[in-house]
């Protein structure tokens, strides 16, 4: 069974701090996505990575896909209260997708 | 362009009843997937429809069913509701099967009492 493990499960930090969350698996994927979900809303796609070693930046967010395409990280620089939410990773092969349980991030002012 | 629209946003039903949820995908997206989200289980895949055909199905009982119309709009139905069916039901549309990203609706919050 393919699994996507996200860590940490919960994270509470102060505004201005940096943080990294992880999405790990023993399986190789053709693509991986990161989403952010706010309470009571659907997840919003942040990024898709497809190439091993790929790094993508979205303002203060940096996403990296592992060289072997089995894992990914999301780094947030100078976190802000607006970054609060559930960060989910999702990966797949041949139209079969799996989801991690997410990292719940709280950024306190 | 308009996003994914799910109706209703909130629903309260009694055990044993049945419910129908609706989803209108982004124009041009032919794939619609449904997910159940609960705090302990995360996002659980229900089924995916593509061009009116169910293409993938998750591990849910037969009480959960769906369909897709020729305009790509989709409905899901849950019969004989149980307390454990209380959840946020999310619809997501994509050009393909979501490997390059979904656009989600805001969800329907179903409470079974």
Image (cartoon, rainbow, N blue to C red):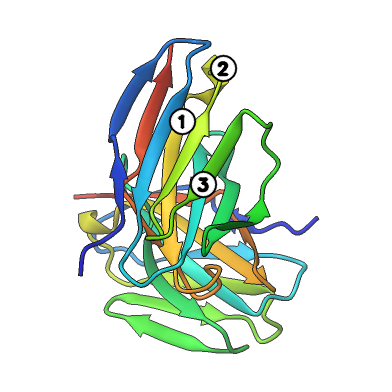
Q: Where is residue B31 in the image (x, y as percent from the top left)?
A: 49, 64
Residue sticking out furthest to the front: B70
Disc 2: host chain: B
Q: Nearer the viewer, mark 2 or mark 1?
A: 2
Disc 3: host chain: B
**Quarter of the image holding residue A75?**
bottom left
Task: Examine the rendering and report whether any part of residue B102 can be seen.
Answer: no
Secondary structure of residue under mark 3: strand
In this rendering, do the residues under marks 3 and 1 share a single chain? yes
Q: Where is residue B100 in the image (x, y as percent from the top left)?
A: 50, 76
Q: Earlier in the sequence, mark 3 or mark 1?
A: 3
- Seen from the viewer's position, the closer of residues A7 and B75 is B75
* Res B67 label: 3
Image-based side of B41 in relation to B12, left or right = right
Residue named by callout 1: B87
Q: Position of residue A57 (x, y in %)?
A: 36, 83
Mark 3 and mark 1 residues within 8 Å of each other at the beta carbon:
no
In this rendering, do the residues under marks 3 and 2 share a single chain? yes
Residue named by callout 2: B80
């Amino acid at each position: 069974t393919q699994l996507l493990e996200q860590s940490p499960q919960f994270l509470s930090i102060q505004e201005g701090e940096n943080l990294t969350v992880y999405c790990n698996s023993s399986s190789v994927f053709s693509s991986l996505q990161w989403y952010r979900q706010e309470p009571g809303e659907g997840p919003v796609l942040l990024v898709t990575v497809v190439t091993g070693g790929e790094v993508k930046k979205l303002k203060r967010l940096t996403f990296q896909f592992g060289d072997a395409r089995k894992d990914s990280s999301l780094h947030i620089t100078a976190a802000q209260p607006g970054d609060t939410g559930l960060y989910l990773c999702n990966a797949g092969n041949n139209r079969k997708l799996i989801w991690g349980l997410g990292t719940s991030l709280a950024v306190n002012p | 362009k308009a996003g994914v629209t799910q109706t209703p946003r909130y629903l309260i039903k009694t055990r044993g009843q049945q419910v129908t949820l609706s989803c209108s995908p982004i124009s041009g997206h032919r794939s619609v997937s449904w997910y159940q989200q609960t705090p302990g289980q995360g996002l659980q895949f229900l089924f995916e429809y593509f061009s009116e055909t169910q293409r993938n199905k998750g591990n849910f009982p037969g009480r959960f069913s769906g369909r897709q119309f020729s305009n790509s709009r989709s409905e899901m139905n849950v019969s004989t509701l149980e307390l454990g069916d209380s959840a946020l039901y999310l619809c997501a549309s994509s050009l393909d099967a979501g490997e390059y990203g979904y656009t989600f609706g805001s969800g329907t919050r179903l409470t079974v009492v």
